[in-house]
Amino acid sequence: GQNIDQPTEMTATEGAIVQINCTYQTSGFNGLFWYQQHAGEAPTFLSYNVLDGLEEKGRFSSFLSRSKGYSYLLLKELQMKDSASYLCAVPDQTGANNLFFGTGTRLTVIP
Amino acid sequence: SAVISQKPSRDICQRGTSLTIQCQVDSQVTMMFWYRQQPGQSLTLIATANQGSEATYESGFVIDKFPISRPNLTFSTLTVSNLSPEDSSIYLCSVEVEGAATDTQYFGPGTRLTVL
């Protein structure tokens, strides 16, 4: 079956850097997605990784190691508005196009 | 990306009644999905809404409880039937959009359902 593990909660200080880890088990890897979800809102797409390495997109970067079944989301120069849940997801292994989500990491940014 | 709207944004319903949620997207899309997000939890797929055929349900979800319509490529409805307090949740539709690197799912704003 599929499985995704993420820390449940993290706290970081405004202006700092935080790394949110995600480990996954799935057959037939087809990429990994990161979504941001503010409380009471819908998830919004952040990044997609299918090859090993770091993808940088402004203050947010995402890293993938397929051999280790591991990804992380790196948030730099944290702002208060970055307080949200960060969801790691992989395509469903049944071959359908839907996503299998982890439980998410709730990040709280403090002054 | 895609612009997705859902109606209603929230509702409070009595036990035993039903609620139908509408999802409208601003462009034609092949794949539409319905997810449930229970309080404090991540997203769980209910079903894939197929245009012109019956929806494909995930394990633990059945058509009698969650009938879905998909009359065209821009619209779908999800009905949550015979409501009980355990159905209190956020229901989200999503669509898949083709991209240069991969097909990406975009989510509607969600419908927050409270069952009394």
Image (tube, rainbow, N blue to C red):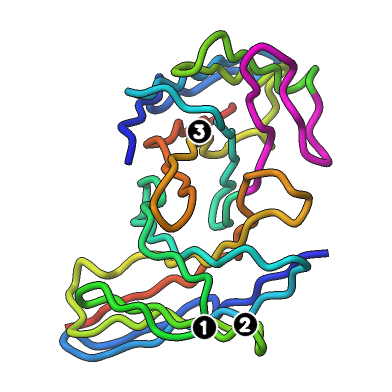
What is the three-letter code of the residue carrying label 3?
A: Cys
Callouts 1 and 3 on one subunit: no
Residue at x 45%, y 86% (from the top left corner): A53
Give the left or right position of residue B19, taking residue B85 as reference: left
Of A107 and B98, which appears nearest the observer?
A: B98
Q: Which residues are magenta?
A: B44-62
Image height of B4 relative to A72, above or below: above
Instruction: Name the side, left or right, on which A85 lies relative to B82.
Output: left
Q: Nearer the viewer, residue B89 or A102?
A: A102
In the rendered structure, which amino acid carries the disc numbered 2? Arg
Q: Chain of mark 3?
A: B
Q: Earlier in the sequence, mark 2 or mark 1?
A: 1
Question: Are callouts 2 and 1 both on one chain?
Answer: yes
| Residue behind mark 1 | A52
Chain of the residue under label 1: A
**Mark 2 burial class by Cα count in 10 Å: few <14, some 14-19, many 20+:** some
